[in-house]
Amino acid sequence: MNKRMPASLGLMGMLMAMSAGVAMAQDYPGATHEVCRRVRVADQPRDNHQIAGTLVGAAAGGLVGSKFGGGSGKTLTTVGGVVAGGYAGKKIQENHQDNNVTYHYEQRCYQAQG
């Protein structure tokens, strides 16, 4: 008696065994893997609070304000010049920093499921 398996049954068995192995590898519900990406990150400005611009603007505003008025009016124009100049200097430096942003690249990784 010949006990050979038909070729189609052998092929089907082999395909089923292979597909079961693939399904088992994909069916780990708690499995995680690490995903890494290279991302572009904006550099922080060195003078985050625009202190230099504020001080230079305040000094210039105070100098200009002191040229106007007389008596107590001179004091008011000087103080007004300091305040206005400080605000203007801060805004000028802030604008400059916003328009001249530099970037660097970092690799960031996280754990992902699936």
Image: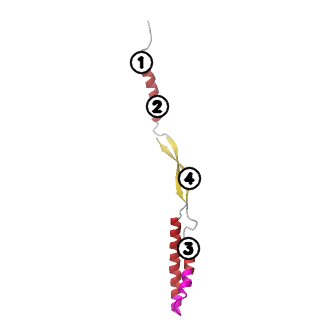
Please name the residue that numbered disc 3 is placed on.
Answer: 53
| Kind of element beneath mark 3 | helix
| Kind of element beneath mark 2 | helix
Q: Is residue 61 magenta?
A: yes
| Kind of element beneath mark 4 | strand
Q: As displayed, is residue 78 above or below residue 46? A: below
Please name the residue that numbered disc 4 is placed on.
Answer: 106
Please name the residue that numbered disc 2 is placed on.
Answer: 22
Q: Earlier in the sequence, mark 1 or mark 4?
A: 1
How dense is the environment of label 2, judged by Cα within 10 Å: few (below 14), some, or many (20 and up)? few
Q: Earlier in the sequence, mark 3 or mark 2?
A: 2
Could you tell me residue 23's position as x and y percent?
44, 32
Mark closer to the observer (4, 2): 4
Residue ranking furthest to the top: 1
Disc 4/disc 3 C-alpha distance (Å): 30 Å
The residue type indicated by label 2 comes to Val
Where does the magenta region start and end? Answer: 60-76
Q: Earlier in the sequence, mark 3 or mark 1?
A: 1
